[in-house]
Amino acid sequence: MATRSKVNVMSQPLRKLALVIGIGDYESGEKLNNTQKDARDMSLKLDRMGFISDGPKLDLTCKEMETALVNFKYSIREGDIVLFYFAGHGAQWEDQNFLIPKDDDRMDADEIKNRAILIQKFLDDFNDRHPFVTILLLDCCRVYHLRNPKLNVALARAKKINNSQSTGLKQMDGKAGTLIAFACAPGTIAQDGMNEQNGLFTKYLLEHIATPNKDIRMIMAAVTRGVMTESKLNQRPSVSLTLWDEYICLFEQSAGKG
C-alpha cells in the first residue's frame, strides 16, 4: 500500500477513480424509488471533483456488475484514490455481505453466492492493486424480501441458527488504507427517502463530500451527524476505517478559487 505524507499529497495530486452503481428496478425484490437518481447525482458530483469514471451504471444484472467491477479493478494503479459507490439492495448470507443485482429472480438458497456480488472479494481485489486509499460508500442497508420461498426459509433458518433477528448487513473490515461506510449500523435498515429526491444517506453524502480541503474522516462525521439528526436517531451510519495517513482529502481547492 502506497503511503504519502500530507505535504506530498497536497503537492502531488493523486489520480482519482470512481465506480458508481445504482439499482432500483429489481425483477423480484422490492423496487427502490431513489437509487437511480442517487447514482446519477453521485456520479455527477464525483466528476466535478475530478474523479475519473464512465458515468453511473444503472440496473445491472449480476454478470454486468461483475464485468464492471473486474474492469474497474484492472484500471486501478498503485497510489490511486479509489471510490466505489453502490445504491440498491444488500443482503447478508452465511456471515457475508452481498450486493443484489437487478436479475434477482433466479436466486435461491443454493445460488445466492453465484447470483449476487460478494463485497469482500472485490474489496480485497481493489486493495491488491495497492491504491493510496480505497473508499466504499454503500447505501444498501434496506429491507430485502425475495419473492422466493426457498430462499426466505433458508434465510430465516440461518437467522435462527445464529440467534439473530437482525436485518441488513454486517460490519466489514478492510486492509490498511480502507474506509467502508454503510448507510446504517450493522443489522439495521436505511431509509430510502420516499418523499425525497435522494435516500437519506446519499442526501448528506452529496451535501458534504465535495467540501474543499477537508479530511474524509471529518466529511463522514458530518454525514453521520446529518443523517442521525434528520432521522431523529432512527438511522445511524456506520463507518469502519483502517486509514494510516493523517490527511486524506478527496477535493483539494486552492485559496481564492470558488
Image (tube, rainbow, N blue to C red):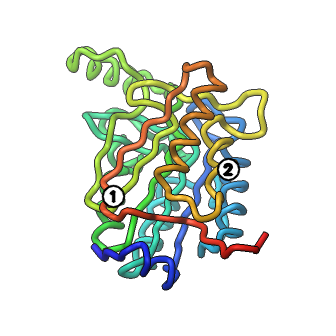
Q: Nearer the viewer, residue 172 or 49?
A: 49
Of pointers 1 and 2, the one earlier in the residue sequence: 2
Badge count: 2
Q: What is the residue that sits farthest to the bottom in this orientation?
A: 12
Split into 4 quadrants, where in the image is the C terminus? bottom right
**Is the residue 4 above or below the residue 240 in the image?**
below
Three-letter code for the amino acid on which mark 1 is drawn = Leu
Determine the residue positioned at 38% across, 72% down: 132
Q: Residues within 10 Å of mark 2 (few under 14, many from 20)?
A: some
Determine the residue positioned at 36% across, 81% down: 78
**Is the residue 89 above or below the residue 257 in the image?**
above
Q: Left or right of 4: which side holds 198?
A: right
Disc assigned to residue 243: 1
Three-letter code for the amino acid on which mark 2 is drawn = Leu
Residue designated by label 2: 206
Tell whether label 2 touches label 1 (CB within 8 Å): no
Q: Quadrant of residue 76?
A: bottom left
Determine the residue positioned at 65% across, 57% down: 211
Camera sees residue 109:
yes
Q: Residues within 10 Å of mark 1 (few under 14, many from 20)?
A: some
Camera sees residue 105:
no
Q: What is the residue that sits farthest to the left in this orientation?
A: 161
- SS at mark 2 in the image: helix
- Spatial CA distance of label 1 from label 2 is 22 Å
The image position of residue 242, as x and y in percent, is 30, 54
Determine the residue positioned at 34% across, 15% down: 165
The image position of residue 239, as x and y in percent, is 42, 42
Q: Nearer the viewer, residue 208 or 189?
A: 208
